[in-house]
Image (cartoon, rainbow, N blue to C red):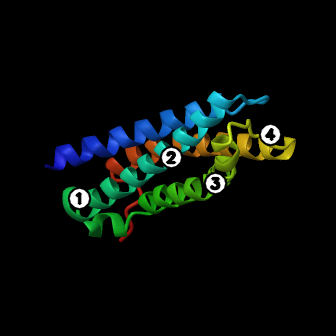
Amino acid sequence: MAALVAYLHFLSIFALFALLSVEHVLFKTPLDLRRARSLVITDLAYGICAGLVLVTGIARVLWYGKGWQYYLHNGVFHAKVGLFILVALLSILPTFVFLNWRHALKAGQVPEPSARQVALVTWSIRIELLLLLVMPLLAALMARGYGISG
């Protein structure tokens, strides 16, 4: 069971990164109806994957990993969780923008984000991607015993 939970954790992380990359590619102006709808769906899938990363990560810490005591006293683990929280906070902006498009999309209208929204969402996604790239390094360090405090 531990291997299955680890596999699901890794798979959800890969899917999270892939979906965020898709958002980055799709979010270009001018938008069309199909891309705008795809962005809303992709962002929903991204949120679901983030939830899976969290649930499987908690399962690994509590039941299938090295024991919660190991993680509790590991600074690298705390940095990794902190980055995950930061990514989650950064993802609020794109999600808010995409959710605000629902009424326009239901009416068959193409959303028209402002230049400021485009810049903020684009940079938010880019920073999220960058932070997600750091997390496997932290995981590799943690797996090799770095970050353990007395």
Q: Tell me where residue 20 appears, x and y as whole percent.
A: 55, 38
Q: Earlier in the sequence, mark 1 or mark 3?
A: 1
Real-space Cα separation, disc 2 to disc 1, in angstroms: 32 Å
Real-space Cα separation, disc 1 to disc 3, in angstroms: 30 Å
Residue at horizontal 39 percent and vertical 67 percent from the top: 149
Residue at which label 1 appears: 66
Please state which amino acid type lies under the numbered disc 2.
Answer: Leu
Element type where label 4 sits in the image: loop
Please state which amino acid type lies under the numbered disc 3.
Answer: Leu
Real-space Cα separation, disc 2 to disc 4, in angstroms: 20 Å
Residue 86 left/right relative to 5: right
Real-space Cα separation, disc 4 to disc 1, in angstroms: 49 Å
The mark lying in front, picked from 4 and 1, is 4
Q: Earlier in the sequence, mark 3 or mark 2?
A: 2
Element type where label 2 sits in the image: helix
Q: Nearer the viewer, residue 144 or 132?
A: 132
Q: Which mark is residue 44?
A: 2
Element type where label 3 sits in the image: helix
Residue 99 left/right relative to 110: left
Q: Tell me where residue 49 appears, x and y as whole percent.
A: 42, 46
> Image quarter for residue 8?
top left
